[in-house]
Amino acid sequence: MKKIWQRLSKREKGLVALTLFILALVVGRYLVYVPVMERRERVKTELELQPQRLEKNLRYIDKKGEIMAALEKARAELKAFESSLLAGDTPSVSASDLQQAVRGLATKEGTQVISTRVINPEVMGSFTKIPIQLEISGQIEQIANMVRGIETAERLLVINEINVRSLISPGVARAQAQAQPPQVQPNLRVSLTVSGFARTQTASPKSEADATKAKGGEVKKAAKAPPRPPREDSDE
C-alpha cells in the first residue's frame, strides 16, 4: 500500500485525499449530523408541547371537584338503576323472576296466561338481556292495560314483539253484544316477547380454580383405580 502511494504523483495524491475527505463528509453527515439534528427537532417539539400538557393537567386538577361530583352522581344513578334489574345470580333465576313479574301484571289486569317460554339470554356488556315469550288472552282493555303496566313497571321491562289475533268472527261478536245479559269472554289472543335485564355474573378466578382442581382430582382418582379382573366362564 505504501509503495502504491509513493508511486502516485502529487496531483493523484491530491485527488485521492479530496475523495477521502468528501467521503468522510458524506458518512459523517448521515451518521452524525442527521441523527443529531433529528434529535434536536424532536426535543424542541417536546419542549414546545410541555407547557400545553402542563396547562391541560392543571385544568383537570382545577376541575377535580366537578369530576368527583359527576362520578358520585353516576354511581348514584347506577345504584338506582340496579333496583330496576331482575333478581338472580343466573339467567335461569332471572328468567323465573321475570315470569313471576309478568304473570302478576297479567293476573292484576284480568288476562289469562296460556303459556310462557324462556328465550336464550343475550349478554350485553355488564348486563344480560333476559327475554321470555308469552301467550295471553283477554279483552281489548285488559290487554291494553297489561301492556301499559309492563311499560310503566318498576322493573326495567321492554316489549320486543307483539302479535294480536282475534278469536271470534264479527257475526259472533254482534250476537254476544245483543245477548241479555251481554257475554264477556276473551276475544283476543296476544303473543308477547318481553325482556328484562340483569347483571352479568362472571365466575371468580377462585371458583374456576376450585372447579379445575376438583376435575383434576376426579381424573387422577379414575386413573389410580385398579383394572377389573376379567370374568372367567365356568364349565358346566
Image (spheres, rainbow, N blue to C red):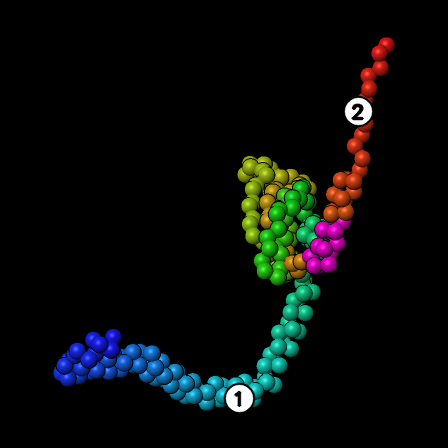
Res. 162 in view: yes
Checking the image for residue 58, the label placed there is 1
**Overall secondary structure of the magenta stretch?**
helix
Name which residue lies at 69% across and 50% down. 92
Amino acid at dot 2: Pro
Frontmost residue, 172 versus 21: 21
Frontmost residue, 25 versus 210: 25
What residue range appears in magenta? 203-214
Name which residue lies at 80% across and 37% down. 225
Verify whether residue 128 appears in magenta. no
Quadrant of the rendered image containing residue 233: top right
Q: Is residue 9 left or right of residue 45?
A: left
Distance (Cα) linking label 1 and label 2: 83 Å
- Height in image: 17 above or below 99? below
Name which residue lies at 33% across and 78% down. 31
Could you say whether the residue bearing mark 1 is in a helix, strand or loop?
helix
Instruction: Answer with mark 1 or mark 2, whichever residue precedes in sequence.
Output: 1
Percent from the top left, x then y, of residue 27?
29, 78
Location of the N terminus (image quadrant): bottom left
Could you say whether the residue bearing mark 2 is in a helix, strand or loop?
loop
Frontmost residue, 12 versus 56: 12
Res. 141 in view: no
Within 10 angstroms of label 1, few (less than 14), some, or many (20 or more) residues?
few
1 or 2: mark nearer the eye: 2
Checking the image for residue 230, the label placed there is 2
